[in-house]
Structure formats: structure tokens, C-alpha cells
Image: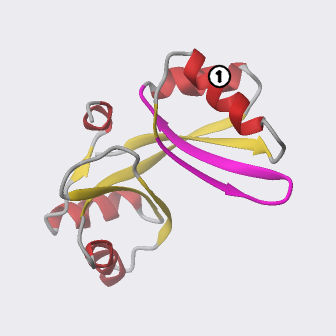
Amino acid sequence: MFVKQISVFLENSKGSLSRMTRMISEAGLDLIALSIADTEHYGILRCIVTDTEKGYQTLKDAGYTARLTDVLAVYVPDHPGGLADVLDVLRDESISVEYLYSFVRSSGSHALIIFHLDELERGAEVLTRKGIRLLDQEQIRSL
């Protein structure tokens, strides 16, 4: 039900993103989903890779500050209002979205959105009960 995401602190300097993504590539890993939020001096890169443990260990061994976080990978109907409908379900249950980002892979009639919620387990239960499909780690890798 949950998907593991790697969060990495990156210095906000020329080439830091290139070096980190090259390291992931040289470890034989594919970046499946990616989001970056930055400030003046550093950024937080959030990503999902084909082998989470290997990606996490590769980054830690290279001296990066990284951590693993559970997130939800949610099929969202790909039409006007599709995301708003999913967000309404969470709002109606008083579940807050801490952040979200879209998924890189194509899935046909649905968009894939990564959600981090203030109540992850309850959010997963509510979305599933409302008929909204969640993907697990293996399903993500097979896309």
C-alpha cells in the first residue's frame, strides 16, 4: 500500500543535481518519480527509484543526508477535476496533504500522483474505501 521515497538534502549549487543523479545512474538505478523544492542554500530532492534500498545506501555511502519516507502512489483520473475530486475526499476526512508531485511514467487514462499526508494510514484507508486505486512498490517498478 505504501511506496518508499528517498529524500535527499542537496546543496543549492551548480552541478549538485547532476552529480547526484549521475550517481544514481551509475548504480544502475532508474529515477521513476522526482520532485525538488529549494531555498537559497539547499534543496530537498524527493525521488522514487527502481531499488529503494540500493539507492538510499548509495547516497548515504557518498555522504549525502538522506532518509526514507512512506508515501502513497495514487491513480488519479486524468480529466478536468480528477485531482480536485481526490483532494475533496481527503478534505472531507480532515486529512491534510503535506506535499504531492506527479509521477513520471505514463498510465493511460489516469495520472499518477505521489502524496505525503499528515495521516498516511488513514488516508490510504479512506482513498481505498472511496474506490481510489493505490499502487504498491512492485506495481511502481513494473510501470
Q: Is 118 rendered above or below residue 47?
A: below
Against 113, is 26 above or below? Answer: above
Residue at 61% x, 38% y is 67
Coloring scheme used: secondary structure
Q: Secondary structure at mark 1?
A: helix
For residue 53: magenta?
A: no
| Magenta-span inclusion, residue 49 | yes
Is 49 left, or right, of 137 in this rendering?
Answer: right
Examine the residues drawn in magenta and state their main secondary structure: strand
Region rendered in magenta:
33-50
* Residue position for label 1: 23
Q: Residue at x 84, y 44 (%)?
A: 13
Residue 3, position in %: x, y? 38, 42
Where the C terminus falls, by quadrant? top left
Q: Position of residue 65 (x, y in %)?
A: 73, 36
Q: Percent x, y for residue 104?
A: 40, 46
In this rendered view, identify the residue nearer to me: 138 or 112: 112
Name above or below for residue 24 compared with residue 8: above
Q: Locate residue 8, reporting x and y percent.
A: 66, 40
Look at label 1 and name its amino acid. Answer: Met
Res. 136 image quadrant: top left
Which quadrant does the N terminus fall into?
A: top left
Of residue 2 and residue 37, the one placed in the foreground of this image is 37
Residue depicted at x 62% and y 20%: 58
| Residue drawn where x is 34% and y is 75% of the image | 87
Left or right, 2 with reference to 43: left
Q: Quadrant of residue 19?
A: top right
Instruction: Sort mark 1 into few (<14), some (14-19) or many (20+) by Cα contacts within 10 Å.
Output: some
Q: How many marks?
A: 1
